[in-house]
Amino acid sequence: MRRHILVCLPLITLLSLFLSSSCQIDPQTQALLQFKAGLNDPLNHLASWTNATLPCHFFGVRCGDGSATVTEISLSTMNLSGGISPSVGALRDLTRLELDSNSLSGPVPPELGGCTQLRFLNLSCNVLSGELPDLSSLAALEVLDIASNGFTGRFPAWVGNLSALTTLSVGMNSYDQGETPPSIGNLKNLTYLYLAGSSLTGMMPDSIFRLTALETLDMSTNNLAGAIPAAIGNLRNLWKIELYKNNLTGELPPELGKLTKLREIDVSWNQLNGGIPAAFAALRGFTVIQLYHNNLSGPIPEEWGDLRSLTSFSIYENGFTGEFPANFGRFSPLNSVDISENGFTGPFPRFLCHGKNLQYLLALQNGFSGEFPEEYSACKSLQRFRINKNQFTGSLPEGLWGLPAATIIDVSDNGFTGTMSPLIGQAQNLNQLWLQNNNLGGAIPPEIGRLGQVQKLYLSNNSFSGSIPAEIGSLSQLTALHLEDNALTGALPADIGGCVRLVEIDVSRNALTGSVPASLSLLSSLNSLNLSHNQLAGAIPTSLQALKLSSVDFSSNRLTGNVPPGLLVITGDRPFAGNPGLCVDGRSELGGVCNVDGGHKGGLARRSAVLVPVLIAATLLLVAGILLVSYRSFKLEELSRRDLERGGCGQWKLESFHPLELDADEICGVGEESLIGSGGTGRVYRLQLKGRGGVVAVKRLWKGNAARVMAAEMAILGKVRHRNILKLHACLSLGELHFIVYEYMPRGNLHQALRREAKGSGRPELDWPRRCRIAHGAAKGLMYLHHDCTPAIIHRDIKSTNILLDEDYEAKIADFGIAKIAEDSSDSEFSCFAGTHGYLAPAGLLAQGDGEDGRVQLRRGAAGAGHRAEPDRPALRRGQGHRLLAVRQARRGEPRRRPGPARRGDGQGAGGHAQGAQDRRALHRQAPRWAADHEGRGEDAYRRRRGALQPARAAAGEDLQHQELPLNFWSRLCRLPTHGCFCSCIELRTVILLMSFVTEPTIGSCTCRYFVQL
């Protein structure tokens, strides 16, 4: 026996050692699993990160050649949230860490400094916060990209110790104000420097101008002061300079002429003065020149007429004078030109569209004179064409009327003569036509009725004659019609009732005859109506009283009859003056007695003697009928209540959607003592279920539309599953009784939470981190509805009371009673407004018309007052904290591409090769050019001159579908310490601004640093 034990003992020992070794987790695996545990992965990209898989086979992980050592983690644009675990510091051999373009939050762990082999670190485009730890131990680091986060505290001056850096991108964060650290001048290998939006003050340090390898210098959107140092001429490798939106003064230094490799320069939105230095003008490689909104003066150099590569030229709001170079654009593939608001005189340059690539031509408010060049008739690429407020004369080139791609044509405030060409019908994309204050004549061509997209027609103060074409009634998108101060004759066409979106009509000071068309009463959106100073006759239709007019003018016509009393209430008597036959309370001309014969008076009295008793009797019958119906309804409800009390809930129809033990008797017996709220669709109760059912919310629907509301909720909430969409447990119905059971939200709705104070502190309950969490959750929910659901679901009533909060302040979108499924058919019910009275969800507004115009209007509301309402220019300004998220090429010599779907390069694996990483690394570097100025020209210039790519595909052969693109790439939150407000901005198919997050009366200072435009 003892001999057997001695023989088996070694075997037992070996077996125990084997089992103990097999139970031990590899340190790399343990570190990666801890890292995963701190993340939220809604798309389940990290499913392969398990104990059963070797770390080298984890999704997004790469090991060194021929070894099992983890060297790279690449998880860009994976829709990850949560925090960065300190366990990442245990991966000592890590050389590359890419976590950009996600929704990671919290601080950067100091343990990351233990990855001393790290050469590439990209944490950009997240919502990381706190003060950056000192990572100067990462001596091998070549690329550091932490831009577009929410880092606070002191600017990370320790970056000056990372002498191996070639790319430093730390901009667009919320650092404390301070001067640029001179230690950055130690980075002799630096080729890319991005310090935009870093709260930098003072002058540009001399040490930066010792970085002779530098190719890109971006210190935009700061508070830099003083002149641009002459030492900038030392940076002979520079090809891009971005210094816009600072407080720079003085003249452009002649030393800029030494930068022979310079391709792009943007010093706009400063206080620079003086002229263009001759040495600077002699540079030949420009592709982009942005000098707008300064005090620059003098002529534009003739040498710039010989440029061969220029695509974007924007110098508006300066004091440039003289004649514009005649050859400008003759040899360049110009895409955008904005020379507005200067003092240019003489003839207009002929060759701006010589390359057939010009899309944006803005030359308003100058002194150009003579005839407009015929060459632009062939400029079919033009999208925005504005030459208003000049001194042009003669006829417009006929081809300009039919520009097929134009959305805006504005030639107003000039001296143009001639007629409107029938070619206007070919401008199928035209959104706004501004012709006012010219000497145009002739008839308005009927072809104008083909402009199906037009929203604004301003033809006033010309010499148009003839009748208003009936085809104008085909303009279903038209919102403003201004034909005043012309010589139009004939009747106001009844077809105008087809312009169902009209808000303003002004046809005053013409020679119109006939009657006022009753079809005007069909224009439910009409707000202003001016028919004054014409020769209109007949009575004013009483149906016009149904319109919600705020301004009306029928004065100086030949109208007769009684003024509808509803119109008198709006503006009083004056808008009806100058109509001798018009009667107000039996008096004409607002003072004289109406000429009404005695027989007529007697007949009216006799009819009144009969009508009054009939009306009284009808009123009594109506009241009696209402009382009878109310009594019967009360008795039926009482019987239903007694049936419930006596016999329980009867034969209920129960539809269950989530596993939950529900008792119909328990639900329908909920009492008034449990009432927690009441809304437009019913009353909501809190119900503690028996057993382990927990707490639920029970909504008892009002009668009437209860079945429709329940059907809508079941059709949508019964099918969708998302952490930010309120969970529907069940629906119960019996006769006219309808109950809906939801998950219970202990924090109530956002409207209530915004107005509550934290217990005992006197401070608002929702601090900024909580608001950020709520906004992000709501954005995720909307993104899911719009892009992950097929077909898409449009809520149509997004507001603070329909965003509920759970115990952890996680947002849940609720109340889908009027939501719609976006079908492909054109006869959608979205053509009518829905939702809360007095409130309009922005998504609903934008669904009503052209998306571009809708965005302009929303942004104008969000940016506050004080901006000029020019037709094509959104109100938000660059430098107010906006941040356009777009991926761009960070290397010289690559083409600038417009935003569009892009993919990671073929054959790239999970670790990502250098090129794909470089594309993603540049995601944040788009400085806020979106809507750069009060007239929107910065938007045009920005889009033209910046390339953009969408997120790369997932690696390891796993292609992301369109609906799987990361939510944070479509929605981006912002925190603005200087304004103290939040916005959630989502550019899906519409722009949804969750303006409820601002409790002050105005949101004028609330803007978004992050803005998605894809």
Image (spheres, grey):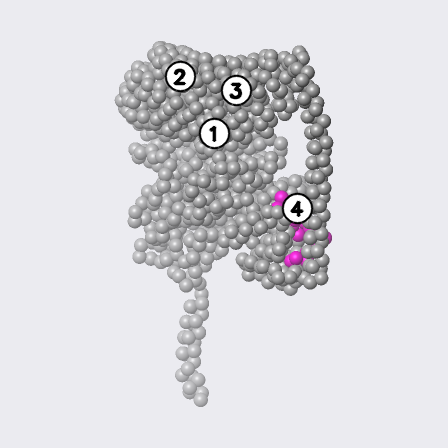
Residue type indicated by callout 3: Ser
Nearer to us of marks 1 and 4 is 1
According to the picture, the residue beneath numbered tag 4 turns out to be 678
Instruction: Identify the secondary structure beneath mark 2.
Output: strand
Q: Nearer the viewer, residue 378 or 344?
A: 378
According to the picture, the residue beneath numbered tag 3 turns out to be 515
According to the picture, the residue beneath numbered tag 1 turns out to be 498
Residue at 31 percent of width and 54 percent of height? 65
According to the picture, the residue beneath numbered tag 2 turns out to be 443
Q: Earlier in the sequence, mark 3 or mark 4?
A: 3
Nearer to us of marks 3 and 2 is 3
Residue type indicated by callout 4: Ser
Residue type indicated by callout 1: Gly
Give the x, y percent position of residue 162. 41, 40
Q: Which residues are magenta?
A: 667-685
Q: CA distance from mark 2 to mark 1?
A: 21 Å
Residue at 41 percent of width and 71 percent of height? 18
Q: Nearer the viewer, residue 218 or 358?
A: 358
Answer left or right for 235 relative to 160: left
Q: Nearer the viewer, residue 700 or 814?
A: 700
Q: CA distance from mark 4 to mark 2?
A: 58 Å
